Amino acid sequence: MALTTLRLIAFPGAPNLPIFAAIEQGDFEREGLTVELETTPSSKFQIESLVAGKFDIAATAYDNVVAYCEGQGAVAFGVTPDLFVFMGATRIELSLVASGECATVAALSGRPLALDAVATGFAFVLYDMLEHAGCALTDCELVAVGATPQRWEALRSGQVAATLMIEPFTSIARAQGFAMLESSVERLPHYQGGIFASRRRWAAEHSGAVEGFIRAYRCGLDWVLATENRDAATRLLLARMPAIQPPVAPAVINKLLDPATGLTPGAAIDPDGMHTVLALRSRYARPQRTLDRIEPYVDLSFFERATAG
């Protein structure tokens, strides 16, 4: 039987482990699918490519979907993109990591800080941390650098004083002597970080493929979360992400397997976490508007059909 190819674009990071597992174990093939996974250098590139039809599915931040649907993204498309969330992925822990001379969040005032983009993604989590520490955003130099590998390189090379990171880069940075100033979990215990998104028209025309993707991903997720597979999951992560050195792998896996900081069991969405994202966007996004309903950005009908029974 010929396999249907799905083009998936994701941010580089440990949360991709269930995808790696589903590929390795043949879960996608059993659903009649083959997945071509590409990592993105930035959210701007990712969303532009998804909207243009170069990819079918994106593993991205929930905030990115909201931003571009509301016309608040880094790119203006002329028409409202028909993006929507069809499955959850992770609450995610965002760690504010800084160079050694910055011992507190307040010490970042006036220094260059790296972001993926200044008005989408996880930018507003950083703004919340800074304001809580008494830093005026106008006193900070906010630099759009790209995805976590690019931000880590900017921090490591001294171009910026701090940035937000996800695993495995947080553990890699700590092992090299960088300071973790604050965790998003401390400020925002419910935050919908990663999700899977697509275009509504494409998904409607390929509903079987979307539902098969959901089932296969959940198989990979269940395998990763099973206690008896911990060692095998660690080996798979090391094989797929050679930048992770074995000494930091246990810390990466611990964060990834904790539902408060990593993968969401069952790939469910967190409505409270989604409302947190909307509240931050209502405070910081421009043009400013109040967002308080998650329904315009989510369609769980594919998920419900895929998991029925």
Image (cartoon, rainbow, N blue to C red):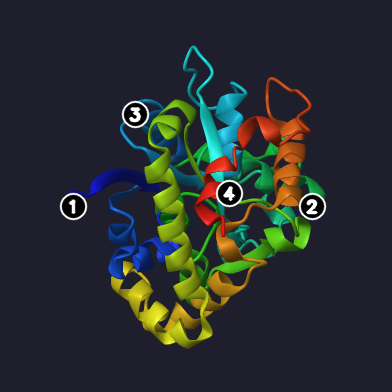
Ranked by sequence position, the earlier of labels 2 and 3 is 3
- Residue 98 seen in render: no
Q: Residue at horizontal 45%, vertical 42%?
A: 145
**Mark 1 touching mark 4, by CB under 8 A?**
no
- Badge 4 or badge 3: first in the primary sequence: 3
Question: Residue 272, position in %: x, y?
Answer: 76, 50
Residue ID for mark 4:
304
Count the labels in the image. 4
The type of residue carrying mark 1 is Met
SS class, disc 4: helix
3D distance between C-alphas at marks 3 and 1? 25 Å
CA separation, marks 2 and 3? 41 Å
Q: Mark 3 points at which residue?
A: 53
Distance from the alpha carbon under mark 2 to that under mark 4:
42 Å
The mark that comes first in sequence, 1 or 4, is: 1
User: What percent of the width, then of the height, locates residue 64?
Assistant: 55, 37
* As drawn, 64 above or below 247: above
Q: Considering only order in the chain, which callout, 4 or 2, is on the residue closer to the N terminus?
A: 2
Residue at label 1? 1
The kind of residue tagged 2 is: Ala
The mark lying in front, picked from 2 and 3, is 3
**Is disc 1 surrounded by few (<14), some (14 to 19) or many (20+) residues within 10 Å?**
few
What is the secondary structure assignment of the residue under circle 2? loop
Position of residue 29 relative to residue 64, above or below, is below
Residues packed near mark 3 inside 10 Å, few (<14), some (14 to 19) or many (20 plus): some
- Which residue position is annotated with label 2? 133
Going by the picture, which residue comes out furthest to the top? 78
Residue kind at label 3, given as amino acid type: Gly
